[in-house]
Image (cartoon, coloured by chain):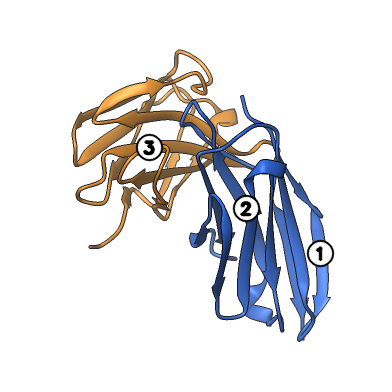
Amino acid sequence: GIQVEQSPPDLILQEGANSTLRCNFSDSVNNLQWFHQNPWGQLINLFYIPSGTKQNGRLSATTVATERYSLLYISSSQTTDSGVYFCAVEGNNNDMRFGAGTRLTVKP
Amino acid sequence: DAGVIQSPRHEVTEMGQEVTLRCKPISGHNSLFWYRQTMMRGLELLIYFNNNVPIDDSGMPEDRFSAKMPNASFSTLKIQPSEPRDSAVYFCASSIQVGSAEAFFGQGTRLTVV
């Protein structure tokens, strides 16, 4: 099946800093989503972004499907941004596969 | 809509017992996914349904696991008999259509098998 790699695995930031999270995938995809798993374990939808660029407040995402990667940008990070960020892709088999995630810690 | 609803939220059971996890997808969604999350293996896709039909169950770990979707508003994941290594958080997700729409997750069921 399709392989999904996320980097970095861990990231520690000072509040107010910016960051970029990366998701690489091994094959063409029909669908790509970014999720945030909060400290309570809930998976929160951030972006549905099979291609192009989207922005939502301090977060934005870009997917370059032809080059098989997506980026999640977090600007002016806050302590509430802490948690694990997952990238999930659906390939031609329509099975949605997750990367291992990036664990973000934002310190006050 | 209340979103994807899973029950129970927590389950503690003894090894060898049968466990049934339940999921109600968002109304109007035609695709449903079951995932298992552990520290060691991350989020693993177990099985997914489209229009109540199982499409791919290659992620189901072994014959002790089974899943059904008798109608568009209900699915179950059953483990019989349960083992301590089945301890994990099990998530259900639904989307309007597999392959081309955003998926939404339930809050998960934390299963502990002792």
Where residue B48 sits, quadrant-wise, is top left
- Amino acid at circle 2: Phe
The residue beneath circle 2 is: A86
Q: Nearer the viewer, residue A41 or B30?
A: B30
In the rendered image, the vertical position of residue A66 relative to residue B67, given as above or below: below
Q: Colour of chain A?
A: blue
In the rendered view, tell whether residue A80 sits above or below residue B111: below
**Could you tell whether B58 is left or right of A27 in the image?**
left
Q: Chain of mark 3?
A: B
Parent chain of label 1? A
Upstream in sequence: badge 1 or badge 2: 1
- Give percent across and percent down for residue A79: 68, 80
Chain letter of disc 2? A
Residue positioned 64% across, 74% down in the render: A81
Q: Marks 2 and 3, Cα distance to the nearest angstrom?
A: 19 Å
The residue carrying mark 1 is: A11
